[in-house]
Image: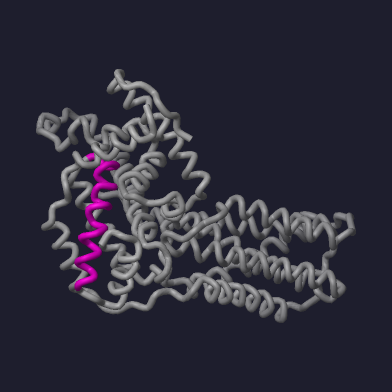
Amino acid sequence: MDSGSNLDTLMARYQAGDFAAVTALVEAIGPRLHRFFLAQSASRSDADDLLQETWLRIHRVRHTYRPGEPVQPWFYAIARRTHIDHYRRSSRTTAHERRLEELPDAAAEFPTDEPATDDLETLLAPLSENQREVILMMKVGGMSLEEVARATSCSVGSVKQRVHRAYKILRGRINAMSPSQGSSRELP
Amino acid sequence: MTEHSVDDALQKAAEVEPPVEPELLKQIAASMQSSLRPVRPLPPTWMLAAGLTLICAAVAIAAAARIGFYGIDKLDLWERLLIFSTLGVMAWTWGVAFINRLIPGSRQRLSAGTLLSIGTAVLLSVFALVFHDYHTDHFVSAGLACLLSGLLLAIPAALLSWWLLRRGFAVNTVAAGFAGGALAGLSGVTMLELHCANSQALHVLVWHTGVVPVSAALGALAGWALRRRATPPVR
């Protein structure tokens, strides 16, 4: 189910109006996209909302996928766009609400749905937004450099550079978290 | 610390993430199925690029036919071949770039900025090769008139191009606007080469070539405005 060619076939069937293909695609890609959002957004409810909004867009623009092209970059490019739009919308909302935030915050005492400290979001926290998304696509989504380049609309060289820098930071972070581990092989 | 250790740490961290609720996935699938009908995928890139190139050429020729072919009359055969084949190749290249920006997950070998730099350099080289009159009579007034005409012509070219690609989806509206603007600007340059009888090198180098980056910048601005309209703040 997870292989690229199966996803291609499912996508073609989805475009042809096959009900079963919709369920299969949502079950195959949905969890990956949810993890992608969860590792980048603050809460599970945000990730749920983003997942729903992404599928809504996917459904609306499903004709833009062309059979024969890699399917994962197509999904992730739309997911990435949804995440960026969400971020922009909330930044602008935050700017509108800045004055309200200066008031005493009674809601601050309520528990929040912050993630656990040993999760993906925490591990990737020191990375920039760009580095985080390429690491998520490559190492968690299982995409190739070429596919990540397509999903992020940049060159393969640029993706390589981001991954290299991200690994450098992650090595330092993991070393700091477990100082007993030694260095046996450097990254390329 | 090895590369594998980092991979392992990422894998373990990913496993800690709570799985998505199956109920949510079912709900998403059900809402998609409720409005499911067959769709026709977009045509291949070469077909759309040919359409865009034809639109640019047709708009430029139609405008020049209306106001006169004074520019092309002053060029000899090899100059015509050099200028218009370069413009044709550039329109095709920008057409492909525009299409790729309207299809999610497309391969983008060059950024729009790099493409514009290369394209402008190529145009400047071709014009420098063809035009050798270094007088600068009415440099600003004549130049602004040409720039404005080129930009005005870019508007119908941009609208028709957008109509052709109306089923596309721009993941980055600014980049798509930039590419579309540059393509439409090429239509303006083509019209100027067909119509403008001013063969002073600096006039052509500055004001004719200038239509492309200015039009690209206006396209990017339009893309930015569209994006702002599409993502209003939540109130």
Q: Is residue B144 above or below residue B67?
A: above
Q: Position of residue B199 (x, y in %)?
A: 84, 64
> Magenta stretch: residue A21 in it?
yes
Instruction: Give me the residue at 73% from left, 59% from top.
Output: B123
Q: How many marks?
A: 0
Expressed as whole percent of the image width and height from the top left, the position of residue B119 reads 67, 57
Q: Residue at x 36, y 30 (%)?
A: A170
Q: Is residue A157 magenta?
A: no
From this view, report whether residue B68 is shown above or below residue B105: below
Q: x and y percent of residue B142 in the render?
A: 77, 60
Using the image as rendered, state which of residue B4 and residue B54 is in the foreground: B4
Specify the quadrant of the image occupied by residue B47: bottom right
Give the quadrant of residue A169.
Answer: top left
Q: Seen from this angle, which residue lies furthest top?
A: A180
Residue A9 percent across, percent down from the top left: 32, 70
Q: Which residues are magenta?
A: A20-42
Q: Residue at x 46, y 61 (%)?
A: B106
Q: Quadrant of the N terminus of chain A?
A: bottom left
Relative side of B177 to B71, left or right = left
